[in-house]
Amino acid sequence: MTESLRALADRVGADLQTLEDRIRVEGERRLKIRFPRGFLRKAECFRAQYWFIRDENLRRNIAYTLILSDVYRWILNRTDLWGTAREMIIKEGVCLIGALCESITKDAAKDICSEKAGLKRRTAAMTQQGMISSEEKKAVDDLWDWRNRQHLFLLNDWEYNKYTLKQYNDAIRTLRGLRMALDNYFRNMETPF
């Protein structure tokens, strides 16, 4: 990293702290900081990646949710947020990706599973159908177990020191693997929907 980039990052960080301190004292709550343009990907980019989702409304909502994932990614990659707050952003990112996998499998498996089938039943049917590999099934199922930590009342221990950036990155890799497998499966169908 060049020295000028480090100096710029230090100046922006110091200016943000000064702004926050002054807002707190002066009470100007309507003031907004401009979020950097160009980092968040557009919904149309995500809709194109998930072309195989048959439900247009679901495809759009998946795209919007992936934009939220980009916001989490920006916070984690561009700020020094730490401690419990950082872990909770990571947890929410993992849960978000788990929810995406749930919806994607529901749409993909609608012709081979009951409407009421749970995620693990769907991934089993998708594996039998050749839509995803057994490794992808395991990754999605494991991610689903982490996603279910969203239900705080089910937890038997504190959530402190439970979430790492590796878990979030693993969740992203799981989603990417699921998307690529389904993209391949549906592209190679003799009679696409």
Image (cartoon, grey):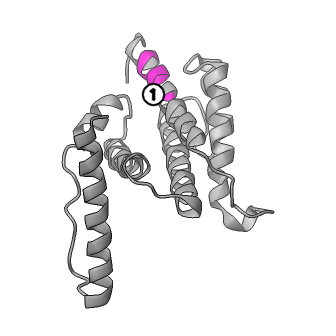
Query: Is 20 inside the magenta-drawn segment?
Result: no
Viewer-side residue, 58 vs 95? 95
Report whether 132 appears left or right of 48: right
Residue 5: quarter of image: top left
Tell me if residue 175 comes above or below residue 73 in the rendering. Answer: above
In the picture, measured across the screen, residue 169 lies left or right of residue 9, that is: right
Q: Is residue 182 magenta?
A: yes
Q: Which residues, given as a range, are shown in magenta?
A: 178-184
Name the quadrant containing residue 55.
top left
Q: Nearer the viewer, residue 157 or 21?
A: 21
**Which quarter of the image is occupied by the N terminus?**
top left
- Amino acid type of the residue tagged 1 in the rendering: Arg
Examine the rendered structure and indicate whether residue 105 appears above or below residue 130. Answer: below
According to the picture, the residue beneath numbered tag 1 turns out to be: 179
Where is the C terminus found, in terms of image quarters?
Answer: top left
Mark 1: which secondary structure?
Answer: helix
Q: Nearer the viewer, residue 106 or 112?
A: 106
Identity of the residue drawn at 51% across and 30% down: 173
| Magenta residues, dominant SS class | helix
